[in-house]
Amino acid sequence: MKTENNKFAKAEMLIRKPVSEVFKAFIDPQITSKFWFTKGSGKLEENQKTEWTWEMYGFSLSVKTLVLQENKKIVIEWGNPDELTLVEWIFNPLNENETFVSVTNSGFQGDSDKIIDQVRNSTEGFTLVLAGAKAFLEHNLQLNLVLDRFPKGLA
């Protein structure tokens, strides 16, 4: 995937679980809903569209899976139709019980201020997602990081 020099967001995290378990957590909405969105229309499948919903925010998003390499890589396209970006997960097994996950979001468009805002929001968002995944997969804890990022009553 081609990323322009400074027009991408990146978040990375070591998750102390086997790569197969970590990979499955990002393609199976039954698991992903424990740390990210609240509902998914189905498992990610290459060249298929899936709907992800964040019920607490009344928001849904269609994602198209472009690449699905088991236990290695996921690439999706998502966003508003006129502002699609790519999200790429790389799963790097360090040993049989540790997986280093790297998430890159690229393809941001607009003026410098808009791109900086998108990169900052994406970096923060995927950092929370990875931290939530780590807590859930390693300790079976649901930290509600995405839910609590924008509490009701705060602008």
Image: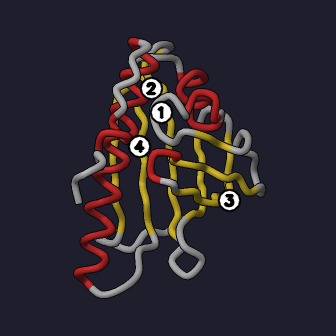
User: Going from the N terminus, do you reach mark 2 or mark 3 first?
Assistant: 3
The residue that mark 4 highlights is 102
Image x and y of residue 41, in percent: 72, 45
Q: Are marks 1 and 2 in contact (CB under 8 Å)?
A: yes
Image x and y of residue 35, in percent: 45, 32
User: Going from the N terminus, do you reach mark 1 or mark 2 first?
Assistant: 1
Question: Label 1 is placed on what type of residue?
Answer: Asn
Q: Looking at this view, is 46 or 125 the one in front?
A: 125
Alpha-carbon span between mark 2 and mark 3: 25 Å
Q: Looking at this view, is 144 or 67 the one in front?
A: 144
Q: Nearer the viewer, mark 1 or mark 4?
A: 4
What number is the disc on residue 92? Answer: 1
The residue that mark 3 highlights is 64
Q: Going 51% across and 68% down the picture, which residue do you hit?
A: 85
Task: Report the side of 91 relative to 16 (left or right).
Answer: right
Question: Label 4 is placed on what type of residue?
Answer: Ser
Q: Are marks 1 and 4 in contact (CB under 8 Å)?
A: yes
Q: Are marks 4 and 2 in contact (CB under 8 Å)?
A: no
Alpha-carbon span between mark 1 and mark 2: 5 Å
Alpha-carbon span between mark 1 and mark 3: 23 Å
The residue that mark 2 highlights is 99
- How many neighbours does mark 2 have within 10 angstroms: few (below 14), some (14-19), or many (20 or more)? many
